[in-house]
Amino acid sequence: MEAGSAERNSLTENYRLPIQNYFIGWQCRVRELALRNEEGRPNGGMQPQIALKNGEVVFPAATLLIMPDHPDQTIRQFRFMALKTQDPKERYTKALQLLAAKFYQNAEDFSGGMSGIFSRSSEEVEELEKHQYCVMTFDYQQQVFKIPCHVCESPKNESVYEFTYWHNYLFNPNLSPEVKVLHFEPDWDKTVSDPTPI
């Protein structure tokens, strides 16, 4: 490896807290496991409890995606697969193959931002948007994370919306185009885990 490349990698790593790397690595492993062994069905590691800052639980288990830092190429692949065939089984199979192959292999491709699809008429979503802040609790396979997050709606045609919508459409062909995508940005300084990063 060239010295300049090593320095760039070092600089990138310096912007991440150990708990951030720990969570992202855990998320990648949990998602690979679901794709390879559970036919892509969401497991508890993808479905945190979401509560307001005052502790009021608004979603006992919300299925979320972890956003890649550079999603544009993946969005194009998702859209192409979604529009190429009308057969939902073929879409599902192709999506599983794409994601299981190598999508989650490199934790450095992610910074930990998350997104999810929600109903536009949801009172719980209104509460989240009003407060613009929440606390997620992941509790799965003897690993717990409590992650405070800033939350906002992602507008249509932005990458967070596009990635989230097309990903979900591949697994759910009945998905309405009139959904709301929420974007969650973790506050890593206030994140805690049990066990903690070694």
Image: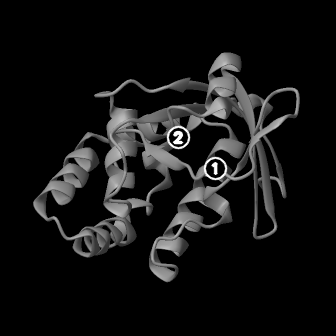
Residue at image point 73% right, 30% down: 134
Q: Is residue 186 visible to the viewer in this orientation of the structure?
A: no
Residue 66, x across and y down, in percent: 51, 48
Comes first in the chain, label 1 or label 2 = 1
Whole-Å distance between the Cαs marked 1 and 2?
9 Å
| Kind of residue sitting beneath label 2 | Phe
Q: In the current view of this chain or complex, which residue is farthest to the top?
A: 130
Image vertical order of residue 80 relative to residue 7, above or below: below
- The residue lying toward the viewer, choosing from 195 and 16, is 195
Report the mark closest to the observer, 1 or 2.
2
Q: Label 1 crowding class (10 Å Cα cut-off): few <14, some 14-19, many 20+?
A: some
| Screen quadrant of the C terminus | bottom right
Residue 161, x across and y down, in percent: 38, 35
Tell me where residue 84 sits by quadrant.
Answer: bottom left
Marks 1,2: beta carbons within 8 A: yes
Image vertical order of residue 74 relative to residue 170, above or below: above
Q: Is residue 22 left or right of residue 105?
A: right
- Label 1: state its secondary structure: loop
In this rendering, the count of numbered labels is 2
Residue 118, disc: 2
Residue 62, disc: 1
Q: Is residue 123 visible to the viewer in this orientation of the structure?
A: yes
Image vertical order of residue 126 relative to residue 79, above or below: above
Residue at image point 38% right, 60% down: 172
